[in-house]
Image (tube, coloured by chain):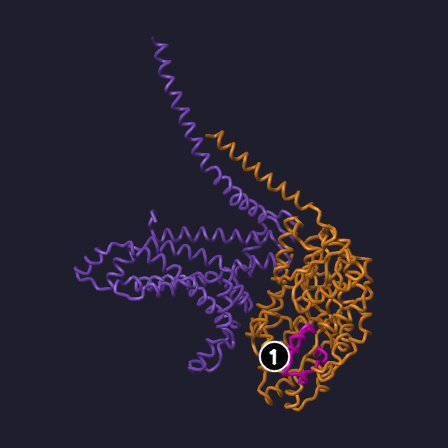
Chain colours: A purple, B orange
Amino acid sequence: MITVKTKQNIQPMHSTRSLRMKNTAIGWSFIAIATVLICLFYFYPMVQALIMSMQSGTGTNLTFVGLDNYARLLQDPTFLTTVKNTVIYLIIQVPIMIILALFISVLLNDKTLKLKGVFRTAIFLPCVTSLVAYSVIFKYLFGQDGIINIFLLKLSIISEPIQWLTDPFWAKVAIIVAITWRWTGYNMIFYLSALQNIDHSIYEAAKMDGASPFQIFFKITIPLLKPIILFTSITSTIGTLQLFDEVMNITQGGPGNATITISQYIYNLSFKYTPDFGYAATVSYAIVIMIVIFSIFQFKVAGDKNA
Amino acid sequence: MKKVLALFLVSILFLAACSSGSSKDTSGETKDSNEITVWAWDPNFNIKAMNLAKDAYKSDNPDLEIKIIENAQDDIIQKLNTSLSSGTTKGLPNIVLIEDYRAQSFLQAYPDMFHELTGTFNSDDFAQYKIAPTSVDGKNYGLPFDTGVSGLYVRTDYLEQAGYTVEDLQNMDWKKYIEIGKKVKEATGKHMLTQDPNDLGLIRMMIQSAGSWYLKDDGKTPNLAGNEALKVAFETYKEILDADLVKPISDWSQFLAGFNSGDVATVPTGNWITPSIKAEASQAGKWAVVAHPRLPGVPESVNASNLGGSSWYVLNVPGKEDAADFLAKTFGSNVEFYQTINKEIGAIGTFKPAADGEAYQAGDDFFGGQKIIADFAAWTEQIPQINYGLHTYAIEDILAVEAQNYIKGKDLDKALEDAQKQAEAQVK
């Protein structure tokens, strides 16, 4: 009896286990391709880049130097300038753009607004332009004899042309104006879609309670948009840290490194100067570390773990 | 679970092994031996010269197919760097044009990737200052092509209004240039020259005229602090700015517009600008070229300098013998060919025997009948020979920052010392 009983017990247990094994195997095989590809094209290059960031030398004559590159990084005045410039872009441009995008999206979400589609398209249109093409156009707009200077001169707002591209301060302004123009519409789209998901009855209730438009905006719209604001500020931060095309095409980092970004420095180290791919990889890892730190910081400030 | 995971890891390794293995196979693939490829930039100059070389070579060697591909210079540099550093030569051309300032960085960063050309041409036939940048350890790797010999292009009509003739400008130094510039500005209201604060080409020309460079003769040690020529060059640069002789620009097209629109009275630059100057036909007869100004108070400085210029290199890929032969029989020895490219595109090579040909002795009506080619050829021989070394552009970016600081009031010796320190950390 006992032996039969155990046999009976073991039989179904064994079959469920093999079934579970089979299911797991099928499950794994579904994600296998993606896993392999991600490992091959993401993690493998990452590890290779990390190894490379500990080497130094010209072109193919790389030798292992350990953490020397990272020590050099912290003492490299050009790198520190690039970080400074990038942080300046970040703390000035990202808030301006986020506020502007928020403002425009609330205006465009007004139920009584006519020709909504036209306005939305107009503001989103910069995002579909090529980065290089728009940079070149901005370069001409901001030129010494560019339309912006001519406009300001003709209106007698300024008496001498502003050196937009050859003065360290104005060059930064020009870059910030350019990237704000390019990316505001992109962020606006996120806010618009989020605004449309807010239940209209909340606003009606607020109005019934006598809330002013400002109160509605700050007490209802902003809190409800918080996850999206967090999302856009993280993506904008990452985007700014990777800023390259605009600076490369509008000012080439000049005058005298006044607008150079970290990404452009990587480009210069690899292609403009005698190539030192090892040190260039070190600088790229610096960007990775900074993006991680900024992202953690932003999540903490926003204080929302589910966002 | 663990077994499955292990299986995946193995398969990843396997795939990785496959991919690296297969790339090695393809790089060894032989090309069709009857075809060689050339990469160069500037369709009006280098590409045209190459096309003429192709025609000249074809009559004697009809079997070789030569494909000439135009790429922007920056693109060529990127493609070379990425391909050569990955170790695969697939897709690379047989012949490539490289700027002299960058040549050493390629030759030393990728040894064995370039085909030695020693013996295929006589290096004594070429301007001596072109040999150092194109060789490593006494071996020739590049066939010298165009000269970047510089001159001072001047508007004779503006000078006349200020009471000067072209003779007054011959063999002058930069002090006199500034003095004339002030008068010209007074008389005509025109700036003397355009300058891009990112581009220190003017400084480079100034110091080369004194046989000095950003790097010492070894091509590796920065030579900034205590470099007398560089110091005088910076002082001169600041004086020119302070005298308000400069119209600031930020790119190449504004540079061209500066003189084509008649906004500036002079253009100190390389001779390769001649086609662009002549592009504005309405200014015919109003231009002349005088010798490049020398540095004041620097005895070594001569009235000749150089800006840019490039040479042809053969990559170490199948077809290299054909490519070397093609270069040797055209750019390396053919006097007739140099006359043709001179007549057709105004190109001045650095091949000395060509200077006696009739094309070099012809006057140019655009420049009031001046024999500008003969003048440039004469100045070419006076250019001091220097080793551009490995880090011209890396140091220039550092110097551009310190130049800004200096113009804003920083002490010059301190600025150069700071630049020296940064450069030493950068290029070690």
Whole-percent x, y for residue A13 in the image:
37, 20
User: Can the viewer see residue B232 in this picture?
Assistant: no
Most foreground residue, A231 or B204 = A231
**Magenta segment, which residues?**
B266-294
For the N terminus of chain A, give its image quadrant: top left
Give the residue at x 48% y 30%: B2
Q: Can you tell which quarter of the image residue B258 is in?
A: bottom right
Most foreground residue, A218 or B276 = B276
Whole-percent x, y for residue A127 in the image:
43, 61
* Residue B268 lies within the magenta run: yes
* Residue A131 lies within the magenta run: no
Q: Is B228 above or below relative to B183? A: above
User: Can the viewer see residue B214 in this picture?
Assistant: yes
Most foreground residue, B171 or B69 = B69
The three-letter amino acid code for the residue at tag 1 is Asn
Q: Is residue B354 left or right of residue A163?
A: right
Give the residue at x 52% y 43%: A43
Q: Can you tell which quarter of the image residue B301 is in?
A: bottom right
Give the secondary structure at mark 1.
helix
Q: Is residue B271 left or right of residue A286?
A: right
Number of numbered discs present? 1
- Circle 1 crowding by C-alpha within 10 Å: few under 14, some 14–19, many from 20: some
Q: Is residue B390 left or right of residue A219?
A: right
Whole-percent x, y for residue B331 in the image:
77, 64
Q: Is A223 above or below relative to B358? A: above
Give the residue at x 74% y 77%: B303
| Residue holding disc 1 | B260
Whole-percent x, y for residue A96 in the image:
38, 64
Give the residue at x 58% y 40%: B16
Q: Disc 1 is attached to a residue of which chain?
A: B
Q: Is A243 above or below relative to B407? A: above
Q: Can you tell which quarter of the image residue B274 is in?
A: bottom right
